[in-house]
Image (spheres, helix red, strand yellow):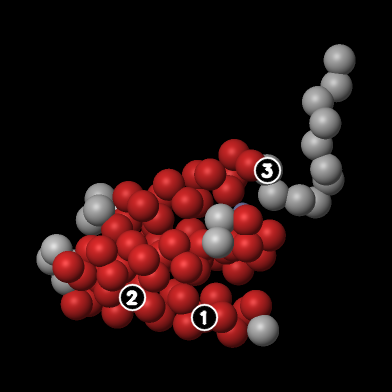
Amino acid sequence: MTTIEDAGTMTDHECDEAISELYRYLDGELDPESLAHVEAHLRRCSPCLEAYDFEAELRQMIAAKSAEQMPAELRRQILGVLDRLDDSLN
Ligand SMILES: [Zn+2]
C-alpha cells in the first residue's frame, strides 16, 4: 500500500489550508502574520494561484467586502499582496 505523492510539489491539503487561511483573514479572524504565511505559500506555489484563479477571486472578494465595511488598512494590505504576487508571476 502506497500513497501517490509527487515529490517536490505542494499537496492539495497545503493549498486548501492556505486558501482557507486567507478567507479567515478577510473575515478579520487572522493576524497579519497569517497573511504573510498565505502569501509565502502562493509565491512558491504558482500552480495553486492559477488553479484557484486566486487573484480574480481575491479581487472579487475585496470588492464585495468593500461594499460592506472592509477597513482601508486591510484592503491596502491585501492589494499589496496581489501586487507582490503579480511580480513573482511575471
Ligand atoms: Zn498551493
User: Which residue corresponds to mark 1?
Assistant: 84
Q: Which mark is residue 77?
A: 2
Callout 2: few (<14), some (14-19), or many (20+) C-alpha neighbours within 10 Å? few
Callout 1: few (<14), some (14-19), or many (20+) C-alpha neighbours within 10 Å? few
SS at mark 1? helix
Real-space Cα separation, disc 1 to disc 2, in angstroms = 11 Å
Q: Quadrant of residue 5?
A: top right
Q: In the shown orientation, is residue 76 left or right of residue 46?
A: left
Answer yes or no: do the residues labelled 1 and 2 have beta carbons within 8 Å?
A: no
SS at mark 3? loop
Q: Residue at x 25, y 53 (%)?
A: 27
Report the amino acid beneath label 3: Thr
Real-space Cα separation, disc 3 to disc 2, in angstroms = 27 Å
User: Which residue corresponds to mark 3?
Assistant: 11
Can you tell me which quadrant of the image ligand 1 is in? bottom right
Relative to 25, does residue 13 appear above or below in the rendering?
above
Q: Residue at x 32, y 50 (%)?
A: 24
Real-space Cα separation, disc 1 to disc 3, in angstroms = 23 Å
In percent of width and height, residue 25 lies at 32, 56
Q: In the shown orientation, is residue 36 left or right of residue 72?
A: right
Farthest residue, direction left: 69
Q: Residue at x 59, y 39 (%)?
A: 13
Q: Earlier in the sequence, mark 3 or mark 2?
A: 3
